[in-house]
């Protein structure tokens, strides 16, 4: 293959990957087809083929996140791991880590991101660097490593703002706001999220996420009526309602309705959330739904224990803490002091594990 053709194929893949990073879904779909035709009609070397396969894998993950068509766990052959090109090594580790994150295997994602970070110097692209910082920050956030998460998020936000990636920058702000909220600084957290809500209005998906974030913060403050209002507003946005994130919001709405004893409406939303969590194969929200059904529909603490234990075994300690605390409050309100004490101990133990980052997650 001529050098000109090699450069053309490489440039087309780079252009395609840039659309994936910027979340320009329609343009990425178009460029994928053009790139695929170019690869199939030319005698590409192994490096270009490997580059195409890695970006195509990342494209599939984007489509999985934005569509109901791809819901199975994607995989990449271990034998594919490149050994001669540092850029391809970086992409292999980073994209594989993204797949682990999407499928809720957060510790496995961190291990891959650490390997990718050692090769980040070979990536001479600011947007790609910001993408890496954002995903790494998200994983540390899910593992309750808030200081580390906020550091990566701030780096991502700075670069996205400099590049004019407004929506991506807003998304990083939302996570920073949620971090403050989860740490109990509700005033600071709500301020950040409200500012993001204002700037997100031109972007329906992110606007809905901002509304949901405010709802989550109000839920933590036990202002269930206001949380209900924000969750309902988020679900009025079609792009959010018909997505995996919308399924999570649907569960959040059901939960705050239960906690206000609006059982009929709560049951309706819980059933919808259960269907969505099963459809998207979302482990966390499948167990959150199980928890709410066990606690509020059946008052069956064996079901509650099953949901909490499932999350704990998957190292979701913040989620374990939240549900155990909720169960303790429910039991205390019902006058069941023995169960209240049990779940408060469970919540306390989960708190102690927030800083645990073992490498045992498969």
Image (cartoon, rainbow, N blue to C red):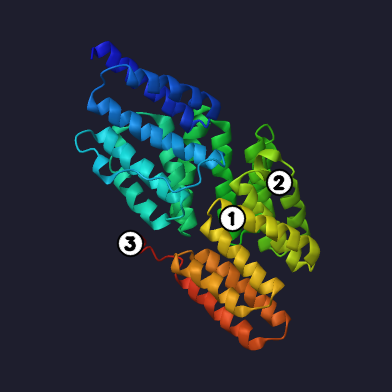
| Residue found at the very far left of the displayed protein | 84
Q: Quadrant of residue 260?
A: bottom right
Rate crowding at label 1 as few (under 14), some (14 to 19) or many (20 or more) other CA atoms within 10 Å: many
Q: Quadrant of residue 182?
A: bottom right
Residue occupying the point 37% across, 52% down: 110
The mark nearer the N terminus, 1 or 3, is: 1
Residue occupying the point 61% across, 59% down: 185
Determine the CA span between mark 1 and mark 2: 18 Å
The mark nearer the N terminus, 2 or 3, is: 2
Residue 79 image offset from top left, x and y in percent: 24, 43
- Residue situated in front as seen by the camera: 166 or 76: 76
Q: Is residue 127 above or below residue 335?
A: above
Find disc 3 in the rendering and name its residue.
359
Find disc 2 in the rendering and name its residue.
234
Find disc 1 in the rendering and name its residue.
277
CB within 8 Å, label 2 to label 3: no
SS assignment at label 2: helix
SS assignment at label 3: loop
Figure quadrant of the N terminus:
top left
Mark 1 or mark 3, whichever is nearer to me: 1
Rate crowding at label 2 as few (under 14), some (14 to 19) or many (20 or more) other CA atoms within 10 Å: many
Residue 123 image offset from top left, x and y in percent: 32, 32
- Residue situated in front as seen by the camera: 314 or 150: 314
CB within 8 Å, label 1 to label 2: no
Residue occupying the point 71% across, 65% down: 222
CB within 8 Å, label 1 to label 3: no
Q: Is residue 55 above or below residue 218?
A: above
């Amino acid at each position: 293959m001529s050098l000109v053709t090699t450069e053309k194929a490489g440039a087309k893949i780079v252009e395609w990957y840039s659309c994936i990073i910027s979340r320009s879904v329609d343009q990425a779909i178009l460029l994928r087809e053009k790139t695929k035709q170019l690869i199939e009609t030319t005698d590409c070397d192994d490096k270009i083929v490997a580059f195409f396969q890695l970006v195509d894998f990342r494209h599939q993950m984007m489509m999985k996140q934005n569509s109901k068509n791809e819901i199975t766990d994607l995989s990449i052959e271990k034998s594919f791991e490149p050994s001669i090109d540092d850029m391809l090594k970086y992409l292999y580790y980073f994209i594989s880590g993204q797949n682990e994150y999407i499928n809720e295997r957060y510790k496995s994602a961190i291990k891959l991101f650490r390997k990718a970070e050692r090769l980040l110097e070979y990536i001479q692209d600011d947007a790609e660097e910001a993408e890496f910082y954002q995903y790494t920050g998200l994983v540390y956030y899910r593992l309750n490593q808030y200081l580390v998460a906020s550091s990566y998020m701030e780096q991502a936000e700075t670069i996205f703002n400099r590049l004019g990636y407004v929506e991506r920058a807003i998304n990083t702000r939302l996570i920073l706001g949620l971090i403050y909220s989860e740490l109990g600084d509700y005033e600071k957290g709500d301020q950040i999220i409200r500012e993001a809500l204002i700037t997100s209005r031109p972007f329906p998906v992110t606007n809905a996420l901002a509304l949901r974030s405010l709802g989550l913060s109000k839920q933590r403050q036990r202002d269930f009526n206001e949380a209900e209002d924000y969750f309902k507003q988020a679900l009025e946005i079609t792009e959010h309602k018909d997505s995996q994130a919308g399924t999570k919001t649907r569960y959040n709405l059901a939960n705050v309705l239960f906690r206000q004893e609006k059982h009929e409406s709560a049951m309706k939303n819980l059933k919808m959330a259960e269907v969505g969590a099963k459809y998207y194969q979302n482990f966390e929200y499948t167990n959150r739904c199980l928890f709410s059904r066990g606690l509020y529909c059946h008052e069956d603490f064996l079901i509650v224990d099953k949901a909490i234990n499932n999350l704990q075994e998957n190292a979701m300690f913040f989620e374990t803490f939240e549900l155990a605390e909720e169960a303790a409050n429910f039991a205390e309100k019902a006058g069941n002091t023995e169960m209240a004490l049990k779940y408060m101990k469970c919540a306390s133990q989960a708190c102690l594990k927030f800083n645990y980052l073992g490498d045992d997650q498969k």
